[in-house]
């Protein structure tokens, strides 16, 4: 079964159902084309943000981009703990679930591995928190085909 959404794209119902599944949500790697994931997230009614991390070098760059995209509260301090706290709150973005698409991830993931690994660990912890709240939280890093970021591949619906 497919669903037609406003853009005219056809999104498989199985992809929509996958994104609604809190037990499968987490941190994943996908190829460079994230359009179907974005369309499915919208069809599922999930909050969606696309964040281009192609020029990220460190924690400050990464957390700053995400903070801007998600309109973090003024109290956000820019460190990993505050980043995790904000992502674990999101009361200013009530939704049945959340999808963060991190586009162009190879520069950060391959060139700044230690910071990337820390970001992934924090995002994974946030996904587990939201799972306990009954909501899916997806952090999906896109990169070129064949890039091994050390992340599981986004599940094929």
Image: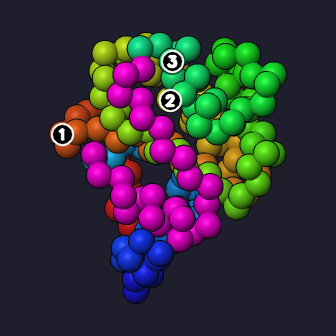
Q: Quadrant of the N terminus?
A: bottom left
Q: Is disc 3 in contact with disc 2, using a CB cutoff of under 8 Å?
A: no
The residue at which mark 2 appears reads as 120
- Residue 131 lies, with reference to residue 141, above or below; the image says below
Label total for image:
3
- Real-space Cα distance between discs 3 and 2? 15 Å
Secondary structure beneath dot 1 equals loop
Question: Would residue 64 be seen by someone viewing this image from the given angle?
Answer: yes
Residue occupying the point 63% across, 30% down: 67
Residue occupying the point 58% across, 63% down: 21
For the residue pair 100 and 25, the one nearer the viewer reads as: 100
Other residues around mark 2 within 10 Å, as few (<14) / some (14–19) / many (≥20): many
The residue at which mark 1 appears reads as 146
Q: Which residues are magenta?
A: 32-56
N-terminal-most mark, 3 or 2 = 3
Left or right position of 115 against 142? right
Secondary structure beneath dot 2 equals helix
Q: Quadrant of residue 94?
A: bottom right
The residue at which mark 3 appears reads as 61
Q: Nearer the viewer, mark 1 or mark 3?
A: 3
For the residue pair 136 and 24, the one nearer the viewer reads as: 136
Residue 109 coordinates in the image, percent (x, y): 36, 24
Residue 8 disc label: none
Residue occupying the point 61% across, 60% down: 46
For the residue pair 155 and 88, the one nearer the viewer reads as: 88
Residue 147 coordinates in the image, percent (x, y): 23, 35
Question: Would residue 136 be seen by someone viewing this image from the given angle?
Answer: no
Residue 86 coordinates in the image, percent (x, y): 73, 32
Other residues around mark 1 within 10 Å, as few (<14) / some (14–19) / many (≥20): few
Residue 37 coordinates in the image, percent (x, y): 42, 59
């Amino acid at each position: 079964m497919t669903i037609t959404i406003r853009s005219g794209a056809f999104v498989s119902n199985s992809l929509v159902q996958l994104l609604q599944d809190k037990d499968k949500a987490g941190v994943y790697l996908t190829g460079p084309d994230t359009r179907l994931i974005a369309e499915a997230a919208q069809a599922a009614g999930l909050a969606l943000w696309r964040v281009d991390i192609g020029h990220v070098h460190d924690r400050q760059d990464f957390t700053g981009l995400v903070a801007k995209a998600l309109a973090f509260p003024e109290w956000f301090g820019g460190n990993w703990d505050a980043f995790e706290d904000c992502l674990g709150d999101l009361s200013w973005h009530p939704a049945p679930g959340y999808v963060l698409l991190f586009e162009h991830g190879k520069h950060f993931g391959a060139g700044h591995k230690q910071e990337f690994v820390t970001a992934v660990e924090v995002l994974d912890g946030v996904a587990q928190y939201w799972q306990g709240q009954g909501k899916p939280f997806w952090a999906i890093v896109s990169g070129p085909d064949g890039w091994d970021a050390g992340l599981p591949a986004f599940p094929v619906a």
